[in-house]
Amino acid sequence: MDYRVTAERIDSHGSLARSKDASLVLDTDVAGRRDAFNPAELFLAAIAACMIKSIERVTPLLKFELRGVEVRLSAVRQDAPPRILRVDYELIVDTDEDDARLDLLHRNVRKYGTISNTVAAAVALEGAIRRRAVVGGATAGIL
């Protein structure tokens, strides 16, 4: 497979990326902007999307039942030379599956994710999976 994206500078405050029928405003303003993802945030979002897509791919194969997934990521950046040193993540799964099955899901996400495998080859990518907490009989906080 190959992937194609084009990006074009709109003005000194932003750019626009396009792929297929989708477009995405990019924060390319040196001062930053709150209404668009900057390159580091896009990087983290790509990892999150990869992990969620991996979950979507393997849950039917594993017959793994879930109600939702949330991925929380953070990155540590070095200034000179500028680069990401590490990415930490937390996969939060709303499920009644047992701990062994949750661990199996995590192993599959780590093994088969194209973006996460690419990132892990270049930078420390570490994280954990956990079950969504139940608060007062209702599952707490999946967006």
Image (cartoon, helix red, strand yellow):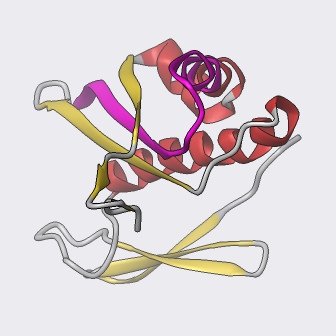
**Residue in the foreground of this view, choosing between 87 and 122:** 87
124 inside magenta stretch: no
Q: Extreme bottom residue here?
A: 11
Image position, residue 77 (x, y; %): 18, 32
**Residue in the foreground of this view, choosing between 13 and 33:** 33
Quadrant for the C terminus in the image = bottom left
* In this picture, residue 95 sits left or right of residue 1: left
**Residue in the foreground of this view, choosing between 114 and 107:** 107
Q: Quadrant of residue 116?
A: top right
Q: Extreme front residue here?
A: 137
Image position, residue 1 (x, y; %): 89, 40
* In this picture, residue 74 sits left or right of residue 58: left
Image position, residue 73 (x, y; %): 32, 41
Q: Residue at x 76, y 81 (%)?
A: 21
Q: Quadrant of residue 129?
A: top left
Image position, residue 38 (x, y; %): 31, 61
84 inside magenta stretch: yes
Q: Quadrant of residue 102?
A: top right
* In this picture, residue 98 sits left or right of residue 12: right
Number of numbered discs on residues: 0
Q: Residue at x 59, y 21 (%)?
A: 110
Q: Residue at x 16, y 66 (%)?
A: 30
What's the magenta region? 83-107
Instruction: Tell me if residue 36 comes above or below residue 61 in the rendering.
Output: below
Q: Residue at x 61, y 43 (%)?
A: 50
* In this picture, residue 39 sits left or right of residue 30: right
